[in-house]
Amino acid sequence: MSPLPPQVLSPLDGRYRAAVTELGEYLSEAGLNRARVQVEVEWLITLTDRSLFGSVPLNAEQKLGLRALVTDFGQTEIDELAVLEATTRHDVKAVEYLVRRRLSTLGLDHISELTHFAATSEDINNLSYALTVSDAVREVWLPKFRAVIGALRLRALEYRADSMLARTHGQPATPTTVGKELAVFVYRLERLAQQVEDSEYLGKFSGATGTFAAHVTADPAVDWPAVSRGFVEGLGLTWNPLTTQIEPHDWQAELYSRVSHANRVLHNLATDVWTYISLGYFRQIPQVGATGSSTMPHKINPIRFENAEANLELSSAILDSLAATLVTSRLQRDLTDSTTQRNIGVGFGHSLLALDNILRGLGEIDIDRAMLARDLDANWEILGEAIQTVIRAEVSAGRSTIEDPYALLKELTRGKRINRHDLVAFVTELEIGDAAKARLLELTPGSYVGLADPLLDYLT
């Protein structure tokens, strides 16, 4: 990897470049231009396959040569496009001229006028963005997202039987298990992964105002909507028949909203894990050579989860803005989407960086079972819920005449610290059936976890 100049503005292109570089394959200017070349090339092949305007179908070797313009797209083409755009002041026109030059090199000058035929720039751009975004999501973002889910799943299953004091409203509450709490995030994230997986990527190819006007004027006998549909679907996209000059970007708003939602669930995970570390439920595994604090040698800071938290916020801010603004275009076209879409990679980049940090962070923590046990043993009052519920069941069954069991346990436990001895003494004197009393006397904070363990069987 060549060194970057020190003046780069974005930390994604500097400090964090290694973590997000895969996205650059698709969501960079070079990735976009490669996709533009692909669209131009495939449109040429579509037109010639139908022998339109005096053309004849290209042979296999000619098609291979044309498609090599995409597969071989590299620094030479990037530099050449920069020179062309300096003159054209138009990025898509520069791509058209590049393709025309390559046609000449390939001995295909006779079809050069079919380059960019009846196409507006947005016909090329909307398909190119759909291709690059779909590839970036499917090839880079989703695999990393699923890797985080996989790591969480392994932790959830490993810790499924490890009891932990819950803290509803930050206060000691009915215990759970570490595994069950992580499984909640697995379940939430799996749903979102599937929604992102099922996202549609729409495309249009219908001219300056979406009417096929130039196409029909050139040849009114051709079924242009059918040609357009076949072309768009041949690129692996969903055809949109009703558009203005632009494809309305609704699919982008839907996708970015889903990814932003996923970011927020991950943010919840990061803040919860950070809090468990603070409580001592998780301990951090020292990394060789790492420094936690520049002045306090003992510290191991939860920087992975803090870094993730901040980057998830940045990602959602960008993706939310894209989702909100891209769905609006004045009348048949304005250029507000042109500059905003250039920040798609930034939005995904911050999310990918956060995923990388969460994945690393999950590999650098372990539970502290001794601390979990101490915290549970220090909070026997949380069994008040179990005792008052059992008493109510006994009263309902006619085996007790205790009035207002909730008030009775509230008086015993609210705002107080009680121990095992206190609860045993209290339960022993209760007017309830022997079986119920035996169950309560066997109960401990660590065993009061209900079905937390078997609930993990709901993970698919």
Image: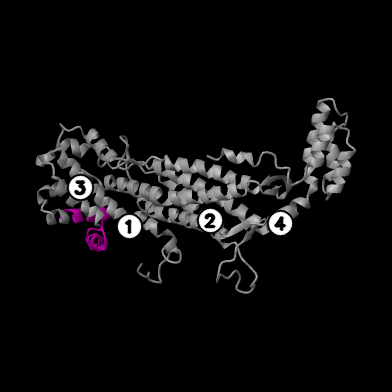
Give the image's coloring scheme. Answer: one colour
Amino acid at the residue labelled 4: Met
Which circle's residue, 4 or 3, is located before the other in the chain?
Answer: 3
- Could you say which is closer to the camera, residue 116 or residue 164? 164
**Left or right of 225, for residue 186:** right
According to the picture, the residue beneath numbered tag 2 turns out to be 358
Between marks 2 and 1, how big is the CA–CA gap?
A: 28 Å
Which circle's residue, 2 or 1, is located before the other in the chain?
Answer: 1
Q: Residue at x 60, y 73 (%)?
A: 294
Residue 371 got which mark?
4
Which circle's residue, 2 or 4, is located before the other in the chain?
Answer: 2
According to the picture, the residue beneath numbered tag 1 turns out to be 29
Residue 116 got which mark?
3
Q: State the predominant SS element of the stretch in magenta.
A: helix
Amino acid at the residue labelled 3: His
Between marks 3 and 2, how big is the CA–CA gap?
A: 44 Å
**Callout 1: SS:** helix
Instruction: Judge the density around disc 1: few (<14), some (14-19), many (≥20) Cα neighbours within 10 Å.
Output: some
Q: Residue at x 77, y 51 (%)?
A: 377
Instruction: Judge the density around disc 4: few (<14), some (14-19), many (≥20) Cα neighbours within 10 Å.
Output: some
Which circle's residue, 1 or 3, is located before the other in the chain?
Answer: 1
Amino acid at the residue labelled 1: Glu
